[in-house]
Amino acid sequence: KEDAEEKARKAAAEKPSAELLERVKELESRYETEVNAVRSEKDQDHEYASGKIFGLQTEIDKQTITIEQLERKLNEQHKRCLNLEEELGTLNKTLDEEKKAHA
């Protein structure tokens, strides 16, 4: 009889209580909630960073276009300067020839 009671007590002691099982379920649920919150925050951070990167890339593209436009304008102005220098040289030559003719 004592041996049967001892076995019953050991079995009861080894069997997890309903309260303990409920606590484990609660902890698992809290863990899942925390994991999901962290994942969600990570996803939001990633979306924010991706948006920032896209915005910066767009701004870089705009600036690149602006730089290219300015380079074209600068090249056009440089060509005009060269043409004006050539024209000035021609005028100086003509002026020198007229001075010689009147001298």
Image: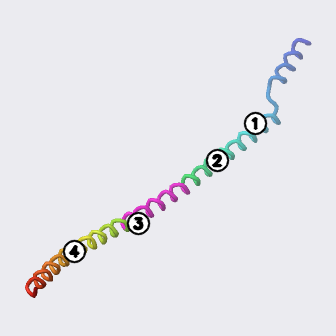
Local packing at callout 4 (Cα closer than 10 Å; few below 14, some 14-19, many 20+) is: few
- Residue drawn at (82%, 21%), measured in percent from left and top? 11
- Residue designated by label 1: 24
From the viewer's perspective, is 94 left or right of 27? Answer: left
- Residue designated by label 3: 62
- Residue drawn at (26%, 70%), measured in percent from left and top? 78
Local packing at callout 3 (Cα closer than 10 Å; few below 14, some 14-19, many 20+) is: few
Distance from label 2 to label 3 (Cα)?
Answer: 36 Å
Magenta part of the protein: which range?
47-65
Dot 1 or dot 3, earlier in sequence: 1
- Residue designated by label 4: 85
Toward the viewer: 78 or 63? 78
Dot 2 or dot 3, earlier in sequence: 2
Query: In this rendering, which labeled residue sits more in front, label 4 or label 3?
Result: 4
State whether residue 55 is above or below residue 5.
Answer: below
- Residue designated by label 2: 38
Q: Main secondary structure of the magenta part?
A: helix
